[in-house]
């Protein structure tokens, strides 16, 4: 085994000490190996000068070996530091992503709860109260500008829908963001079976879902609900949640 291999084998783990301490130990290790070989040559009968020269020749390029050992030891530590830095960065990014998702979910839940409360208030109010203009604090601007459902097919509350109907449509009062929708089920049994890809018509106001309906079945569909608020306009304002119920004839 050469002097370089011998020293490297003793230092497989990155040294946590300072660069100066590493340099000093490398120098001590090299001097030790050189002295040991010089001592072996003296036992063979060589003079001090001859033993030293033969040991140096057999040992190899002293400066090159010292630089190689230093690069190996210091390089391992630098690599470990870079790996640790990379892991810290990945961890920080993961924490930021989780925080953003939690914030978005919380905001969506607040919006949904506000909508449910408003709908319950409307259901509990008298017709005169429902028709009267609301008083008090005005709603925020984005609330007034958010999309709203203006028409559905079949109509909400219909009780004699042809089970051969092949699609359900929902139309909003403004253009919507393409490929963004939330057809939400209350239960699997009351949600229609899909028969194709959901899509918007050319007007970008009407969203269509191809379906296969069963006779004598009550269907319940939400357009946006709770945390599912993907029906939204191009500015990102989520549509007001809307409930559609209808029943197919037997």
Image (cartoon, rainbow, N blue to C red):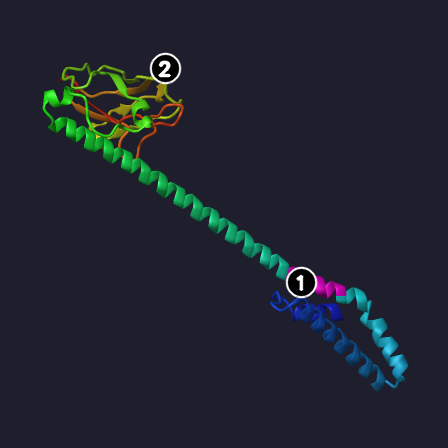
Total number of numbered labels? 2
Q: Which mark is residue 74?
A: 1
Point out residue 164 in the picture as x, y percentages from the top left corner. Answer: 23, 14
Which residue sits furthest front?
136
Point out residue 4 in the picture as x, y percentages from the top left corner. Answer: 74, 68
Which image quarter: residue 223?
A: top left
Left or right placement of residue 4 versus residue 78 in this view: right
Point out residue 172 in the picture as x, y percentages from the top left corner. Answer: 30, 18
The answer to if 191 sits in the magenta stretch is no
Return the residue at label 2: 201
Q: Specify the segment rendered in magenta.
A: 67-76
Q: How many residues crowd around disc 1 within 10 Å: few (fewer than 14), some, or many (20 or more)?
A: many
Point out residue 119 in the picture as x, y percentages from the top left corner. Answer: 18, 28
Per the model, the C-alpha gap separating discs 2 and 1 is 64 Å
Of labels 2 and 1, earlier in sequence is 1
Compared with 64, 46 (above or below) is below
């Amino acid at each position: 085994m050469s002097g370089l291999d011998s020293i490297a084998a003793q230092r497989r783990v990155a040294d946590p000490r300072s660069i100066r301490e590493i340099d000093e130990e490398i120098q001590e290790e090299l001097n030790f190996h050189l002295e040991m070989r010089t001592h072996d040559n003296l036992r063979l009968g060589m003079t001090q000068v001859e033993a030293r020269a033969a040991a140096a020749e057999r040992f190899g390029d002293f400066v090159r070996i010292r630089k190689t050992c230093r690069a190996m030891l210091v390089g391992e530590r630098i690599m470990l530091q870079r790996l640790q830095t990379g892991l810290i960065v990945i961890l920080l990014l993961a924490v930021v992503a989780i925080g953003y998702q939690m914030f978005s979910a919380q905001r969506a839940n607040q919006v949904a709860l506000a909508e449910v409360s408003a709908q319950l208030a409307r259901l509990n109010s008298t017709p005169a109260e429902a028709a009267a203009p609301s008083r008090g604090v005005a709603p925020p601007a984005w609330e007034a500008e958010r999309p709203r459902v203006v028409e559905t097919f079949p109509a909400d509350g219909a009780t004699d829908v042809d089970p051969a109907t092949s699609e359900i449509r929902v139309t909003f009062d403004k253009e919507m963001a393409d490929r963004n929708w939330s057809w939400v089920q209350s239960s699997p049994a009351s949600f229609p079976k899909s028969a194709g890809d959901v899509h918007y018509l050319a007007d970008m106001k009407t969203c269509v879902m191809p379906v296969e309906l069963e006779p004598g079945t009550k269907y319940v569909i939400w357009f946006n609900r709770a945390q599912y608020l993907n029906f939204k306009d191009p500015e990102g304002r989520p549509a007001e949640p809307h409930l559609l119920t209808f029943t197919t004839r037997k």
